[in-house]
Structure formats: structure tokens, C-alpha cells
Amino acid sequence: MTLTSSPHELWGQPQKQQLNFPPILKILPPWPLVDWEVKREGQPEQKSFQPLSAKKLRKRLLWLDGERKNRITVTVCVTAICDGQMIVGASDRMLTAGDVQFEPLQPKIYPLTTSIAIMIAGDSALQSDIIYKVRADVNRRIEAEPKNWWNVQDVADLYVNYYNEFKLRRAESSILLPLGLNYKTFISQQKQMDSQLVSQLASEMVNFEAPKVQAICTGVDITGPHIYIINNSTSQCCDAIGFAAIGVGYWHANSQFMFARHTRSNPFPETLLLTYSAKKRAEVAPGVGEGTDMFTIGTELGSFFAIPQDIIKSLEKMYKRAQQRTRKADRRANEEVNQYVQALIASATTKEQAKIPEVEGGNPPSDDKELPKIAEKETPTA
């Protein structure tokens, strides 16, 4: 079907308003253009296709376009809290550099202190710049105050601040510098500028699109274990649920923790295998690498430990054995349900077609056992 300039033409309705659709519309299925559930007055709720209004359509397309632009297309990083006081993390090695995606032989787990680590997803050049500056600030305070342990939230806030600084600097060079302005002169000279120009420049600065990045900042501080997910310029604490994942494979990894009913009080051995399994499950997503690096932090301050590859290989053997047992159990379940259905079919009795007498009114008899009764009622009495 060829998309037109008006959604109403898709359903043969008269054109009401001309719309300029963004390019993303060319790759979208029809469902964003309609409301699935429609409730009419005086009638029960029913499913139907109803064209969206122009306002609703613009809003939905803008949301979909934003989702597409904010999506990280490679990698997976996973972490979880266990025993109420430990952190377990895992990551692949896929990196993004512009339009290039590759898997080098180096980990994406960066210990910032002996108690806090960060895992990254998104543009590797920008990530390197941010982590370099965050690590410099962290080391500077450690040298000045060695007994003042960093809080995980403070490190996450440092990361967000440097990302916002980069975004402002990039927006300044792209929008203001061609006009002979910088951020300070733009603020100080607003009264001398046309109001429409000021509004336009301010809007472009706020909506400027910097490269998309994600990170997990996790570790143990004096208040216990913590997990923070960073999406561009915002951070979110995940301590309550006890696990988190980022990258294109995040949903596969999170599902593994959900199905296992993981809590932050689960024992360490169980969580170690579960975290590895979550990373392996995420490999079905395109863009997730096969290489795996893992680490633990806790139960005390300063206890970051990079898990050796021989232990990871042992976890891989356990994971494969568990998968084999799961496949065998699935086959047995399929055989059982197949036998059960075949037994139901074999035990079903076929009914002969019964001749329905011609009667006036009422419903036809459900089987031939009711025929004599009906015949008796219709026989005239002497």
C-alpha cells in the first residue's frame, strides 16, 4: 500500500487536513495510525479500527521517532544485587564507533574505584571522553581524601554532568558559533536580539541531539550496594528491584531475572549463574557479542574483583548443561500433551445425525432422545 499525505485516504474517508509526515512513516506498520479500542455510547466496548486525529497522529509519530533515535543498537550490560550486600555484573565486548560496530578483545567494565565500576553502551568515543573526566575527578578526591569513600550516586551524577557539558558544548559550536555567539554572550545579549530569534535559538539548544549513550554505575559504598542506570542526561536508581540491564539486549536480560523471580537477597552462587545466563540469553538480540566479562563487588568496601576467564568458562558449561536439561524437559512435556490430546480424540464418541421433526415454534431437539417426547406431545388425543 502506498502511503499518502493524509491518513483518511487509507480508509477511503474524505480528506480533512493535509499533514506533512516525517520519513519514519515510510517504515512503520499501519497500527500507529489507528486506535484499537473504541467505546461508543450505549454500546459495549469492542475492537475496531478508527483513524487518528491530526493532533494524535503527530504526537504518536513524534514518540515513535524519538524511540527510534534513542535506541542503542548493540551490546548488553547486566548487573544484580545479591545477599543484600554484593554486586555481580556481566558485559559483552561490542563497541560502537560512529557507524562501525565491532567486538575487540577488551572489556567494557571500568573500575573507577575499588568499590565502584561502570559499564557502557552507545558511542564509544563519547563514552571514553566522559569516563576519562569522571575518573580524573574521582582520583583527585581520593588523593586528597583517601578515607572519604565515594558514594555510587555521586559518581553517577558526575557522569550525567559531564554528558550535559558535552551536549552543551556541541550545541554551542553547531548553533551559536556560526552566529558569532557563545553560551555566555547568548545569555547576556538576549535583550538586544529579536525575541523570535531568541526563542528559536533557545529551542534548538534545548532540543539539540547529541550521541546517545547508556551506562550502569554500580558498586558498594558506606550505605550498601547500589545500581544506577544512566540514559543520556538522566539517572535512575534500581536498588529496589535489585537488577538492571542496558543495550539492545536489555529486555532479554531483564526477562531472565523476572522469570527467575530474582530479589536482592538471593544467594551469591545462584545470582552468579543467573547473571551469566541473562547475558547469554541476550545474545539472541542482533548486536550482542559472544565475549563475556564479569566482576563482583562486596561484601566490604574496596573489594572489586574481575572474575577470571577460567571461572567464566566453568559457568558456560553449567549454563549449557542447564539448557540441555530444559530442552529435554520441554520434549517430555510436548510428548505428554500430545498423548493427552490423542487420548481425548480417541475417547470422543461420534453422534449420528438425527432427523428433526417438523414442529411449529420452539427450538429443535438437541439429540434423538428427545424425539419420542416431542412426538408424544404432538399425537392428538382420542
Image (tube, grey):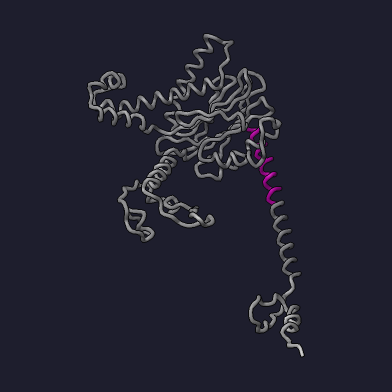
Verify whether residue 316 appears in magenta: yes
Q: Is residue 368 above or below residue 207?
A: below
Q: Residue at position x 65%, y 42% from top?
A: 259
Residue 358 lies, in percent from the top left, at: 65, 84
Q: In this picture, which residue range is highlighted in magenta?
A: 308-328
Residue 263 lies, in percent from the top left, at: 67, 33
Left or right of 256 in this view: 39: left
Q: On the rendered image, what quadrant is the C terminus found in?
A: bottom right
Q: On the rendered image, what quadrant is the N terminus found in?
A: bottom left
Residue reaching furthest to the front: 382
Q: Residue at position x 59%, y 20% from top?
A: 115
11 and 221: which one is in front? 11
Q: Is residue 26 above or below residue 307?
A: below
Verify whether residue 228 appears in magenta: no
Q: Is residue 15 visible?
A: yes
Q: Is residue 108 above or below residue 59?
A: above
Residue 288 lies, in percent from the top left, at: 52, 40
